């Protein structure tokens, strides 16, 4: 009886909490996303010259994103696992199509022209890559063995290189990070993580050599924004 009483005391009594649970939405995750969205409104309002039109459009996009999140929360997780290989394969094919027939804009070839709108396949790959890695690792005992790590690494490297070829270094790094995050939560040992960091550190000069000039400028600006406070470093400062 005492256990039941204590359990009831810790139940969030709020109407919002009850609604979120019925919608199958994780409350801490929702609150973190909501706080991030509110901060984005403040920053956008300040950077956009206090233009309410810009703020209204952003609010509409955020509202649509939350609606999509609520809809996807009702999808059986098994369905995500079931279609992960298909979606990942489709994403890879679309990335290859971008290299062949993609639209060029601002020096980059990242979009596919689909009649009334343009589609950027790399946005899809941000989601399907970690889904694919999770599906593959779920088919084997955890923590992953070297063979599984090698296959998972190849599944991460393939879309990362295709996106970097466009070129889109930022998105390529995000895709690689998303895949690496799944590997981390699958139980990678800290020794293996340290080895990966050491290898990447050793490869840094080679990676730097093949980076384009504007990509190098972005890295240098991120590391030292005060060097150009009124130009490239303005938003960071």
Image (cartoon, rainbow, N blue to C red):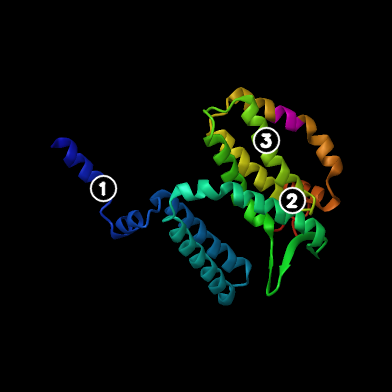
User: Considering the numbered disc 2 on the image, is that residue within a helix, a strand or a loop?
Assistant: helix
The picture places residue 124, in percent across and down from the top left corner, at 63, 55
Q: Gap in Å between the C-alphas at discs 3 and 1?
A: 42 Å
Report whether 55 appears left or right of 211.
Answer: left
Residue where numbered disc 1 is placed? 11
Q: Gap in Å between the C-alphas at discs 2 and 3?
A: 16 Å
Report whether 186 appears left or right of 31.
Answer: right
Residue 26 at least partly seen: yes
Out of 180 and 97, give the one closest to the viewer: 97
* Residue at image point 43% right, 51% down: 76
Sort mark 1 into few (<14), some (14-19) or many (20+) by Cα contacts within 10 Å: few
The picture places residue 96, in percent across and down from the top left corner, at 76, 53
Residue 79 included in the magenta stretch of the image: no
* Mark drawn on residue 140: none
* Residue at image point 56% right, 73% down: 57
Q: Gap in Å between the C-alphas at discs 1 and 2?
A: 46 Å
CB-based contact (under 8 Å), mark 2 and mark 3? no
User: Considering the numbered disc 1 on the image, is that residue within a helix, a strand or a loop?
Assistant: loop
Residue where numbered disc 2 is placed? 163
Out of 103 and 236, give the one closest to the viewer: 103
Q: Disc 1 vs disc 2: which is toward the camera?
A: 2
Residue where numbered disc 3 is placed? 153
Q: Disc 3 vs disc 1: which is toward the camera?
A: 3
Residue interval drawn in magenta:
197-201
* Residue at image point 51% right, 60% down: 37
The picture places residue 203, in percent across and down from the top left corner, at 79, 33
Give the dominant element type of the magenta stretch: helix, strand or loop.
Answer: helix
Residue 223 at least partly seen: no
């Amino acid at each position: 009886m005492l256990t039941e009483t204590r359990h009831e005391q810790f139940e969030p009594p709020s109407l919002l909490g009850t609604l979120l649970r019925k919608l199958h939405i994780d409350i801490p995750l929702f609150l973190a996303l909501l706080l991030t969205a509110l901060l984005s409104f403040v920053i956008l309002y300040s950077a956009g010259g206090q233009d309410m039109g810009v703020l209204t459009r952003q609010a509409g996009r955020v509202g649509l994103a939350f609606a999509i999140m609520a809809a996807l929360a009702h999808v059986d997780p098994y369905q995500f696992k079931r279609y992960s290989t298909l979606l990942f394969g489709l994403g890879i094919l679309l990335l290859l199509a971008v290299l062949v027939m993609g639209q060029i804009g601002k020096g980059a070839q990242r979009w596919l022209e689909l009649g009334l709108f343009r589609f950027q396949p790399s946005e899809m790959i941000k989601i399907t890559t970690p889904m694919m890695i999770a599906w593959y690792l779920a088919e084997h005992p955890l923590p992953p063995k070297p063979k599984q790590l090698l296959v998972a690494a190849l599944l991460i490297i393939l879309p990362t290189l295709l996106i970097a070829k466009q070129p889109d270094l930022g998105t390529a790094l995000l895709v690689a990070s998303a895949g690496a995050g799944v590997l981390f939560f699958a139980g990678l040992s800290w020794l293996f993580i340290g080895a990966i960091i050491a290898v990447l550190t050793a490869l840094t000069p080679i990676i730097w050599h093949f980076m384009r000039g504007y990509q190098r400028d972005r890295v240098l600006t991120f590391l030292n924004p005060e060097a150009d406070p009124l130009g490239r470093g303005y938003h960071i400062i």
